[in-house]
Amino acid sequence: MSGTCIIGLQWGDEAKGKLVDLLTQKHDIVARFLGGANAGHTVVDGDNVYKLHHIPSGILRPEVMNVVTAGVVINPPVILEEIDGLKSRGIPVKNMLLSDRAHIIFPWHFAEDRAMNQSTNDGEDIGTTLRGIGPCYRDKVGRSFAIRLGDLVRPGLKEKIEMIVEVKNRTIQSLMNGGTFEPLDAQKIFEEYSVYADRLKEYVVDSTDYLLNAVDEGKSILFEGAQGALLDVDHGTYPFVTSSNSSGVGAAAGSGVPAKVADTLIGVIKAYSTRVGGGPFQTELFDETGEKIRKRGHEFGTTTGRPRRCGWFDAVAVRYTARLSGADVLSLMMLDVLSTFDELKICVAYDLNGERITHFPSHVDDLRNIKPIYETLPGWEEEITEVRSLEDLPQNARNYLDRISELVGKEIGVVSVGPDRKQTMFTGSLAHFSDVNP
Ligand code: GDP
Ligand code: IMO
Ligand code: MG
């Protein structure tokens, strides 16, 4: 096996971090290929809980190299905080490399994110994480005002910052719509970022070259996605998306490694749906059922602490993102959260202006208009967090899994019944991973 790719198939927070941490045992390298500090990936090892934003979720295992690739946008103070936090807990962070091609987030990106959070659609807030992600990717594509990690650790940084600050002070002021904005101080930013550069330079490499050599040497790579496929800038619920390709199609572009290297793509799903921020969410629940899911699943953002919007599983959306991402197999997480519900609903089709459709609409107007058509399945009473074998799940839980698999058109190879490493069951084509359990 040469590679595995892990992609969230909903709106993020599908528990990708947990799965990456487990599967690193079977790989030489973990490569994170997109996003930045908008992501929050949780790894639970017994009583220890780690929340990672940039650093790949393989960092807890010293034998695995963790690579932050070209497609990631790095916020230096946040990644340094992550490094310091891990070191203070006995994780040495010697096994990490940062791409010199990764773009850097600067204070002007935060100011722009605050000023431009609204979409062009009815002024509804995108509800970004306000981490400067969109503005940094915009500058990357625009090229004129971008600084990469490779630039940060080379001469000429001061002049670049001065030139950019001069323009950004004018543009941000004009975006403020009468509001006040404290102009950015180029000298201060240069001094602050020089300190960051000094601390980060030991990790900086040409990650594309590193990974391509690793492929030649037959090493196995685990590609770690962030966000979820419905937040993909091209194929998601635009404009309520993030600013990079967060579905499977983004793995090759972000990492610089050809897509065919990952011979298994695992699509990660929750047993229900959640979304943070604005935008259409067809199966959202506004009643006590939604509140119960939020409470049982502790559905509050890892990065921003915002309550996550909760709803039923949407098989139409996941069937779309599984096909879009090239998922071979599904990893179904948080099944334990659905215990004690009398009945469970799965969205099997949409009603769009009186017509039954089973494809995922491309335009936000249609996404706002569709009404979910549900199928209802009986729930189960028992808590299942101690279950370690699929045969021991209540029959109704097994029926629920089977129906999701059938509707999405993919096999389920992992079932997770709690945050801990040991609360994980591997089956079918992923049964060979069973021995990763601690
Ligand atoms: P990610 O962004 O996809 O890595 O997911 P997050 O870490 O943001 O959110 C997933 C949350 O669910 C974390 O708090 C995990 O510890 C937790 N978690 C993971 N798997 C399970 C599970 O099977 N059941 C429950 N109840 N919690 C889980
Ligand atoms: P992980 O990797 C959930 C959402 C934001 C917002 C939209 C755009 O932990 O699954 P951005 O700051 O990226 O410009 O915000 O995308 N979003 C996420 N939601 N999990 C994430 O990451 C997310 N990263 C971004 O809430 O709606
Ligand atoms: Mg998360």
Image (spheres, rainbow, N blue to C red):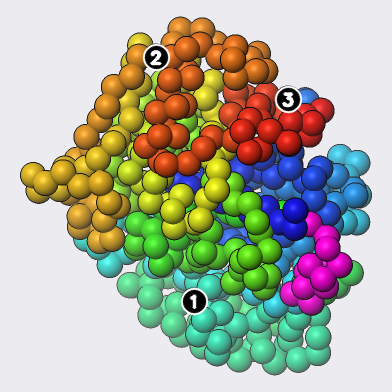
Image quadrant assignment for residue 361: bottom left
Mark 3, other Cα within 10 Å: few <14 / some 14–19 / many ≥20: some
Residue furthest to the top:
381
Between marks 2 and 3, how big is the CA–CA gap? 24 Å
Q: Give the labeled residue for mark 3.
A: 422
Looking at the image, how many numbered discs can be counted on the residues? 3
Disc 2 is placed on an element classified as loop
Disc 1 is placed on an element classified as helix
**Mostly what secondary structure, the magenta segment?**
helix
Instruction: Say which amino acid is labelled 3.
Output: Lys
Q: Give the labeled residue for mark 1.
A: 138
Q: Position of residue 252 (x, y in %)?
A: 61, 68
Q: Residue at x 77, y 62 (%)?
A: 67
Q: Give the labeled residue for mark 2.
A: 379
Instruction: Say which amino acid is labelled 1.
Output: Arg
Confirm whether residue 423 shows in the render. Answer: yes
Disc 3 is placed on an element classified as loop
Tell which of 177 and 97 is nearer to you. Answer: 97
Of the image marks 2 and 3, the number of the one nearer the N terminus:
2
Q: With respect to residue 334, does 148 lie above or below?
A: below
Of the image marks 1 and 2, the number of the one nearer the N terminus:
1
Instruction: Say which amino acid is labelled 2.
Output: Gly
